[in-house]
Amino acid sequence: MRTPLIAANWKMNLGAADAQKFISAFVPKVEGIRGVQVLLAPQAPLLPQLVSAVKSTPIQVAAQNCGADKSGAYTGDVSPVLLHELGVKWVILGHSERRHVFGETDSLIQARLKAALKETLSAILCVGETLEERKKGETLKVVARQLGALQSGTWVEGYDFKNFAVAYEPVWAIGTGETATPAQAQEVHHFIRGWLTENVGEGEAQVIRIQYGGSVKPDSAEALMSEKDVDGLLVGSASLKPEVFAEIVQNAVKSGSDWKNDKDRFK
Ligand code: 13P
């Protein structure tokens, strides 16, 4: 019963005029597509512009990070309170670039997540191993450690787990053109679902969407989405062009996986 969640992570790309052009071209291409949730994550200063631009569409806006506190002396961070006030619905946390370029630790990412959930933001927690870790056979160990941010104590009372997703983004697949094979993605997604079942809850694990990210292209979207535990995609470079990202959204819902046959998923 999981609605596919397809998100564009624009990273530090697309300016104000580009974003406006993107919306004008993208919205008409996807507005007829049912049974999918689409998110756009622009650079922080463009969040209000994007919220306003997608107001009359089902598209939602995501921030690329948020502060670990409501307010305070945290130069460069954006408060989750402000994001909520601006009408931003989602936030991406623990992206591999935040971990590896900016040195964010598991505990900082958990603090950011807790702060986001308190402000009722929906969140995507990114996890994924480096090439070196994969070669050493440490993929699942690394992913389990990163999932530690979701231990009890993180969740707010009565939390609706439809508003939370995990994105598996192997670092070796990000921006490299080397997509994980559907089988490689499914292996880790299956592990994540099992971890969530054990550590968050059985019902919760069935509701939480698990996205794949890393060099997703229109050609790879359908096969990845056909895997049982791949419930969505987090797309970087291929999300910068409206026609390419629209094709990914289109192809993602074409897949013939079980959810396609489950009519309830489209409600
Ligand atoms: P690419 O699609 O450019 O590999 O980026 C993936 C990613 O990091 C999305 O968050």
Image (cartoon, helix red, strand yellow):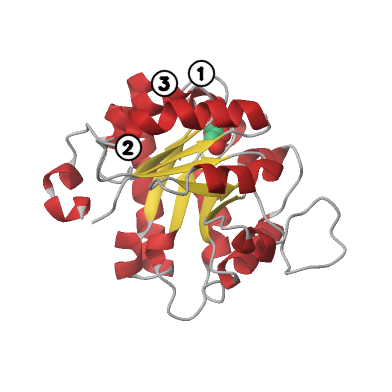
Looking at the rendered structure, the kind of residue marked 1 is Gly
User: Residue at point 52% right, 57% down?
Assistant: 89
- Residue 172 sits above or below residue 145 on the image: above
Task: Give the labeled residue for mark 2.
Answer: 31
Front residue of 29/36: it is 29
Looking at the rendered structure, the kind of residue marked 3 is Glu
Kindly state the secondary structure of the residue where label 2 is placed: loop
* Number of residues whose C-alpha sits closer than 10 Å to that of mark 3, classed few (under 14), some (14–19) or many (20 or more): some
Residue 255 coordinates in the image, percent (x, y):
22, 33
- Residue 199 sits above or below residue 87 on the image: below
Contact between marks 1 and 3 (CB within 8 A): the answer is no
Closer to viewer: mark 3 or mark 2: 2
Residue 251 coordinates in the image, percent (x, y):
29, 28
- Upstream in sequence: badge 2 or badge 1: 2
Closer to viewer: mark 1 or mark 3: 3
- Residue 242 sits above or below residue 106 on the image: above
Mark 1 and ligand 1: say if the CB distance to the nearest ligand atom is below 8 Å. Answer: yes
* Number of residues whose C-alpha sits closer than 10 Å to that of mark 2, classed few (under 14), some (14–19) or many (20 or more): few
Q: Which mark is drawn over residue 177?
A: 1
Closer to viewer: mark 2 or mark 1: 2
Q: Is residue 173 visible?
A: no
Kindly state the secondary structure of the residue where label 3 is placed: helix
Q: Which mark is drawn over residue 201?
A: none
- Upstream in sequence: badge 3 or badge 2: 2
Residue 245 coordinates in the image, percent (x, y):
43, 27
